[in-house]
Image: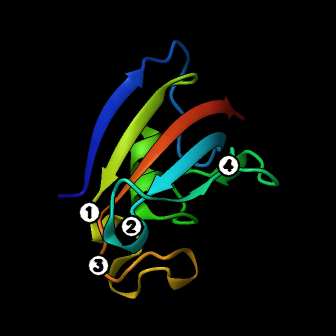
Amino acid sequence: MGIVKDIMRPGSGLKPLPGQTVTVHCTGYGKDGDLARKFWSTKDPGQKEFQFKIGHGLVIKGWDEGVLGMQLGEIARLRCSADYAYGAKGFPAWGILPNSELVFEIEVLRIS
């Protein structure tokens, strides 16, 4: 499947280019195989905005490709198949089972 993107709020700015650093708010869903269960959020107490260099494989493929198509200020839900998320290994520390489909609600805050 790859990525299915559902725009929740359109952006009004530029789209990031490979190599740029993006800053996002993100909430991930899919704990224990349940797409309604949150496993992590930058909005949780003690967490902060997340930054990464886009297009360099430093994050899961769903983020690299999905955020690359988002505009500054946009909020979108990205539904990622297992091969675009954590694959056969999952991420046990966060309750992500092997071969899990995941959903991420992402807001692009800054591009630099």
Alpha carbon separation for disc pair 4 and 1: 22 Å
Provide residue 51's location: percent of width, then percent of height. 70, 49
Residue 87 location in percent, x, y? 34, 78
Secondary element at image label 2? loop
Q: Is residue 8 above or below residue 86?
A: above
Depicted 9 relative to depicted 81: above or below: above
Q: Which mark is residue 99?
A: 3
Mark 3 surroundings: few (<14), some (14-19) or many (≥20) residues within 10 A: some
Q: Is residue 19 above or below residue 17?
A: below
Choose the circle earlier in sequence order: 3 or 2: 2
Q: Nearer the viewer, residue 33 or 6?
A: 33
Badge 2 vs badge 1, beta-carbon distance below 8 Å = yes
Q: Which residue is mark 2?
A: 85
Per the model, the C-alpha gap separating discs 3 and 4 is 23 Å
Between disc 3 and disc 4, whose residue precedes? 4
Give the number of the mark in front: 3 or 2.
3
